[in-house]
Image (cartoon, rainbow, N blue to C red):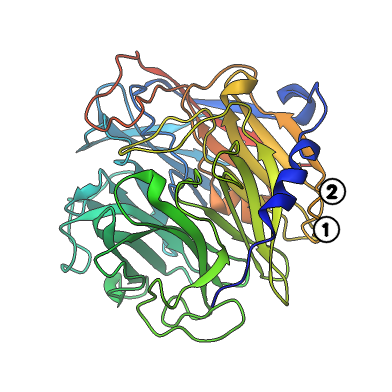
Amino acid sequence: MKTPLIPLCALLLAAGQTQAASPNPGPAEVGARQIPLAAKAYAGSSINVVAGSRQTLYTNSGHQYAGFYDASGRLVLARRRLGEERWQVQPTEFTANLKDAHNTISLVVDGKGYLHLAWGHHNTPLSYSRSLEPGSLAMGEPRAMVGDAEKSVTYPQFFRLADGDLLFLYRDGGSGNGRLVLNHYDVAHQKWSRRQDNLIDGESQRSAYWDMSVDKNGRLHLAWNWRETPDVASNHDLLYARSEDGGRSWQRSNGSDYKLPITQGSAEVAAVIPQHHNLMNPPAVGANRQGQPVIASYWSPEKDARPRFNLVHRDEQRWHTIPGPEAGLDFTLQGHGTKRPPISRAALLVDTGKDKGAHLIYRDDSRGGRVLAASVDDLHNTDPHRPQWHFHYLTERSVGAWEPSIDPAQWQRMKQAQLLLQPVTQLDGNDHSGSDTKPTPLSLLIWTPE
């Protein structure tokens, strides 16, 4: 089912109205603060701080867990008690190719307190481990989950369900030719099983670059863009699916059922975006207080226009697009490998209480390479000419090629944005060579929106 996008000319008319007046409040004024985690972490690529990773931070039962690669290339785990600033740090025996920023870390804690960890994946065999004891940072030997379709894993992501069970999603196959696989972990029996062998199928012609979130009512929201080839310029369209039963069955936003696997012909289109429009992958997805989806990404409203962030959200009738912050510098998104554009991808935070707004957290080189929070007060104001965006600086200095990845439990429970912060260097389009940047400090950035 295809729903037309708000006319592109409307987005262009709003271009001059979305940027807030300068100067913008700084970290001290908005209460942003940092907690040191490591004095030296690997900084030759953006592997420790890549957007779309769920997640390098996770909070469970009064403790927050973190994962990163240190200066020597080891995967390091850390834990702190909430309210304290001292971390318990535990180096592991695990390593990865740090030059390739795809090889990021994903971790989660299950309902019995066991830490689950996946790392080092870019079309490579599954690397997965579980802690030896609940609450422990000591990890067991790497092992299989299900044992099938685990030889070419990319973008592994953990999610925790309300009953303490886990979901694990990953791409099986390569860029432009992959399928989305979904595993389920039964916390009571401590066992993984396959829930979907082929949730989204590229039909050997394309692959889905996806993000998923679990809302406060347990509904799964899955958003993705298609990519036809390994060239990022072939990205197109924003698509959507949801599940009410932990991923067993899937529906469109109007409640109609999908026949699995979802393909290009059956996928619900939330926004029509042609190829070669600077669409970045993957999008970010969340949900508002009514449980309706909100999707964020950036693209150019016309082929030669400057890229800008947009929020695509659903009400009871249809999809709407709210134009957001425009990139301060013009650029063209094309080529293979990990890109280094002058803006980062954004973390999306959607208010689910009495407020009706949303926040984007990202880095903009035109603003000194600092971390920005852009907030819109009312997602329900669908007038494309009057989006009211407010901007705040969350750091005083440049963070290089940093990108955001939040702790989902902290946002859902405490309405705090908590994310790892590290100045890093990323060579554009190069997954084979790291920069010679020396190790840099790694910290936890905390911000509570008003």
Please tell me in which quadrant of the rendered image residue 288 appears: bottom right
The spot of residue 77 in percent (x, y) is 36, 38
The total of numbered circles placed on residues is 2
Please tell me in which quadrant of the rendered image residue 126 appears: bottom left
Residue at 33 percent of width and 22 percent of height? 44
The spot of residue 262 in percent (x, y) is 39, 75
Asked whether disc 2 touches disc 1, contact meaning CB atoms under 8 Å apart, the reply is yes
The spot of residue 4 in percent (x, y) is 63, 68
| Camera-side residue of 211 and 111 | 211
Residue position marked by numbered label 2 in the rendering: 386
Instruction: Answer yes or no: is residue 162 visible.
Output: no
Q: CA distance from mark 2 to mark 1?
A: 8 Å
| Camera-side residue of 7 and 252 | 7
The quarter of the image holding the C terminus is top right
Q: Is label 1 in a helix, a strand or a loop?
A: loop
Instruction: Answer yes or no: is residue 34 visible.
Output: yes
Residue position marked by numbered label 1 in the rendering: 381
Q: Is residue 226 above or below residue 431?
A: below
- Of labels 2 and 1, earlier in sequence is 1
Q: Specify few, some or many for label 2: CA neighbours under 10 Å numbering under 14, 14-19, or 20 or more.
A: some
